[in-house]
Image (cartoon, helix red, strand yellow):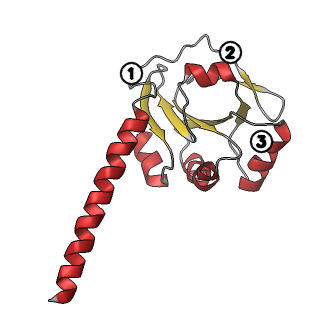
Amino acid sequence: MGSVVVLRSLAIQLVFFIAVFNVLSLFKESSMLSDNSQVSTELVNLPTLDDKTIAITAQQKKKVLYFFAPWCQICHASIGNLENIYLKRDDIDVVAIALDFDSIEEVQTFVADKALTFPVALGNSELKTTFQITGYPSYYVIDENNKVVAQSLGYSTELGLYLRTL
């Protein structure tokens, strides 16, 4: 009988935690670009770590824009999930965009430590403002017409990323 009460109490606490977490997440994400926001195709290409440039707009398939800072511990924990999605899905493009970094070497170290295979671009304060980035990591999924179809702020599981890119 005592174990049933303990299990019921734990279940209630878990449900309460999940509810509070979801409400806080919705509140944090309310400052992001909303679904159906149009991403301007006039945005300039960004420089990448391999001395090329990359368009952050979608081109013929969905694109995940992952905004991160190399010092962000949640970014360190979550970017592997994005790498796994990228390796498993050829129907999406992924671009990680570094913001709030002190040096290119700092970004290069982050990318090397995580063995990332998708393009990594170097963002700027204008892009941060345009995409209303208020925390890291921030994700946007844009469709083939460059409309925001999903967004998230904070840690995201591989399953969460997968579902947002469907």
Any part of residue 56 in sight? no
Camera-nearest label, 3 or 2: 3
Q: Is 3 left or right of 133, judged from the image as shown? A: left
Q: Quadrant of residue 11?
A: bottom left
- Packing grade of label 1 (10 A; few <14, some 14-19, many >=20) is some
How much space separates mark 2 and mark 1, taking CA atoms?
21 Å
Residue lying at the far top of the rendered structure:
42
Q: Residue at point 81% right, 43% down?
A: 106
Indicate the position of residue 20 as horizontal and vertical percent values: 32, 51
Residue lying at the far left of the rendered structure:
1
Q: Which numbered dot is residue 36?
A: 1
**Type of residue at label 1?**
Asn
Q: Is 133 left or right of 21, judged from the image as shown? A: right
Q: Which residue is mark 3?
A: 107
Compared to 81, does 51 lie above or below? above
**Type of residue at label 2?**
Val
Any part of residue 57 in sight? yes
Toward the viewer: 163 or 102? 102
Q: Label 1, secondary structure: give it.
A: loop
- Packing grade of label 2 (10 A; few <14, some 14-19, many >=20) is few
Q: Residue at point 61% right, 50% down?
A: 79
How much space separates mark 3 and mark 1, taking CA atoms?
31 Å
Q: Which numbered dot is residue 44?
A: 2
Indicate the position of residue 128 as horizontal and vertical percent values: 61, 25
Compared to 81, does 139 lie above or below? above
- The mark nearer the N terminus, 3 or 1, is 1
Toward the viewer: 113 or 165? 113
